[in-house]
Image (cartoon, rainbow, N blue to C red):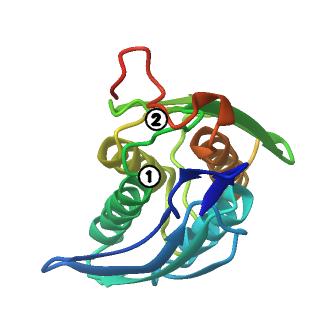
Amino acid sequence: MGIFGNKKLFDDRKTSYSRKSKETEIEIKNLNIDGTGRSVISTTIGFLDHMLTLFAYHGYFDIDMNAKGDTHVDNHHLNEDIAIALAEAFKKALGDSRGIVRTASAYVPMDMAMARVAVDLSNRSAFMFTEKRPVAEIRDEEGYSMHYAKDFLESFSKKLGINLHIEISGEGDLHHYLEATFKALGIALDKATRIDKRRAGEVPSSKGIL
């Protein structure tokens, strides 16, 4: 439990979530927003496993996730459904978001590449992805691409109901750009979901509701 003095400030922000369709099956056995960054992630998409491990570690989120799907066709369905399931788990764990900071941003460099991520847990989805880099599509050896990453991030922001603005710049390969992005997303989301003791458990909006 979150405690401020002798006053309970928020419940444990932990949850489990599963999603199953004819195309994919995803199980999140444990999501702890107030964790230590420990993760066990197996999605059958190696590059995405690595990105989500970085997201969890730098965001101090505990995540146990197993996922499988029709990757013999392509990565699209599984990639998108993992984003949806992860967003649903975060939404469930956050509840009505009382007391959270709500808005935050982070810059992360990765060698010659840079990512800037800004988030607002506003309960309204908006997604912007700006590329100040050569516009050619890039992908890794297993076929994960910038296109798949954008789909993942947009699906995550829409299902969670957040403003998510991302800007990448500099020079790098897919790994550099996206490693910086997922680290920055973890850091920004960690900051935005922290409890602000000054809120005294209020919904973080001047309207009194998100």
Q: Is residue 114 above or below residue 160?
A: above
Please tell me whether mark 1 or mark 2 is closer to you in this view.
Answer: 1
Outermost residue to the front: 6
Callout 2 crowding tier (Cα within 10 Å): few <14, some 14–19, many ≥20: many
Residue 132 visible to the viewer: no
Q: Nearer the viewer, residue 74 or 119?
A: 119
- The image's mark for residue 108 is none
Quarter assignment of residue 158: top left
Q: Which residue is mark 1?
A: 94
Q: Is residue 158 left or right of residue 152?
A: left
Considering depth in this image, is 179 or 32 the residue closer to the camera? 32
Residue 5 position, x and y percent, is 73, 48
Q: Are marks 1 and 2 in contact (CB under 8 Å)?
A: yes
- Disc 2 target residue: 121
Q: In the rendered view, tell whether residue 122 sits above or below residue 110.
A: above
Cα separation, mark 1 vs mark 2, equals 10 Å
Q: Position of residue 97 (x, y in %)?
A: 44, 42
Position of 124 relative to 60 (above/below): above
Residue, x 43% and y 14% (percent of image)? 206
Label 1 crowd (10 A; few <14 / some 14-19 / many >=20): many
What residue is shown at x 52% (from left), y 37% (from top)?
Answer: 201
Which quadrant is the N terminus positioned in?
bottom right
Name the residue furthest top: 206
Say what amino acid the circle numbered 1 marks. Answer: Leu
Dot 1 falls on a residue whose secondary structure is helix
The disc labelled 2 sits on which kind of residue? Leu
Looking at the image, is 154 positioned above or below residue 66? above
